[in-house]
Image (spheres, grey):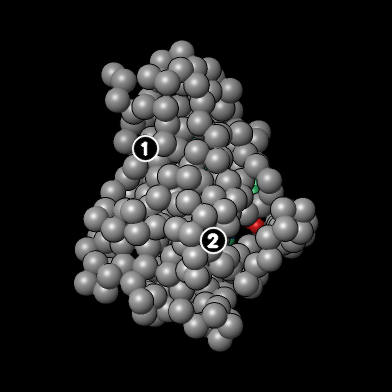
Amino acid sequence: MSSLLEGKNIVVMGVANERSIAWGITKSLHNAGANLIFTYRQERSYQKLVRLLEKNNITPKLTVSCDVESDESIKVAFKEIEDKVNVIHGLVHSVAFAKREELQGEYADTSRDGFLLAQNISAYSLVAVTKQAKALMTEGGSIVTQTYIGSEQVIPNYNVMGVAKASLEASVRYLAEDMGKYGIRVNAISAGPIRTLSAKGVSGFNEKTSIIEEKAPLRRNVDQDQVGDATLFLVSELARGITGEVLHVDSGYHIIG
Ligand code: NDP
Ligand code: N5H
């Protein structure tokens, strides 16, 4: 697999620390020979990223700040990417946010603000970055985002984020249709529960991993490396016939009734 992405420039959004799904993805893409460009929001994430890259002997092509809540920030980030690398071949979107108080209790209690914030950061951001990425994907490309089964089924506590992920997955399909004519594919991975910074402190996480061990066909949880390799597949030419798809990387849990 070491040459699958040789010479390809791929943007990775959403490394916060070594537990991030985007870090698992980074390792898979790096091992496949990709040149990597990173975006981060918080300074803390930048510091962690720099240390992780050094520790793993990965030299990034570029690292830029990008807050997906802001059109201006997205514009500035992609302008810098254009200036430094010109053409990109892939983009990994691994970013989501909802207020902690909206991730418990009844969905019916969701505030307007909380609803719009989750949609803004977790769903609209894919539309906004796809538009910018398209301009740099002059040789075709592949865009991959991260979703969760809470978009398809009612999962206690996932609440406003389930509705945001439903919107994200619908966006994947509409964007796939728009981008197809430019040779750009758009897909999502629906991962099983993985203990990351985002998952920390939200109620109901532990029982989710126990249910997977009990009920999923493979009887084990997935990890960041498994999501990384599936993302590598979707980014690469091996998946050249696939677009508008939601690929479950969840030990088969989604097929169980
Ligand atoms: P992490 O906490 O590691 O990553 C979340 C990332 O979102 C952080 O890097 C954070 O950056 C970024 N982010 C939040 N708001 C913004 C913003 N406004 N602009 C730019 N970046 C932002 O968690 P995960 O790796 O778990 O999450 C990655 C994706 O995977 C999410 O879409 C999540 O919904 C999805 N997912 C996670 C599962 C899990 O069980 N962990 C299961 C299925 C899907 P910063 O900290 O710098 O703000
Ligand atoms: C059913 C579950 C458990 C309950 C719901 C969890 C939802 C998590 C998603 C969002 C993204 C978490 C989130 O926004 C947390 C923030 O309010 C607080 N955390 C932060 O601000 C940290 C510091 C930063 C890094 O986080 C972000 N996001 O920026 C779902 C789980 C079984 C699976 C899961 C955890 C899914 C998912 O989408 O992440």
What is the crowding at mark 2: few (fewer than 14 residues within 10 Å), some, or many (at least 20)? some
Residue 164, visible in the rendered structure: no
Separation of residues labelled 1 and 2 (CA atoms):
25 Å
Amino acid on which disc 1 is placed: His
Q: Quarter of the image holding residue 206?
A: top right
Q: Secondary structure at mark 2?
A: loop
Q: Please provide percent x and percent y for residue 149.
A: 38, 35
Q: Residue 26 in the image: state x and y as whole percent.
A: 58, 54
- Do labels 1 and 2 touch, CB within 8 Å? no
Q: Residues within 10 Å of mark 1 (few under 14, many from 20)?
A: many
Q: Earlier in the sequence, mark 1 or mark 2?
A: 2
From the viewer's perspective, tell me whether residue 118 is left or right of residue 22.
Answer: left
> Is the residue indicated by label 2 positioned so its CB lies within 8 Å of ligand 1?
no
Q: Indicate the quadrant containing the C terminus: top left, top right, bottom left or bottom right.
A: top left
Residue 116, placed above or below residue 198: below
On residue 248, the disc is: 1
Q: Which residue is depicted at the point 51% across and 46% down? A: 228
Q: At 33% across and 72% down in the image, what residue appears?
A: 140
- Residue at figure coordinates x 43%, y 69% from the top left: 89
Per the rendering, the mark at residue 33 is 2
In depth, the one of 156 and 21 nearer the eye is: 21
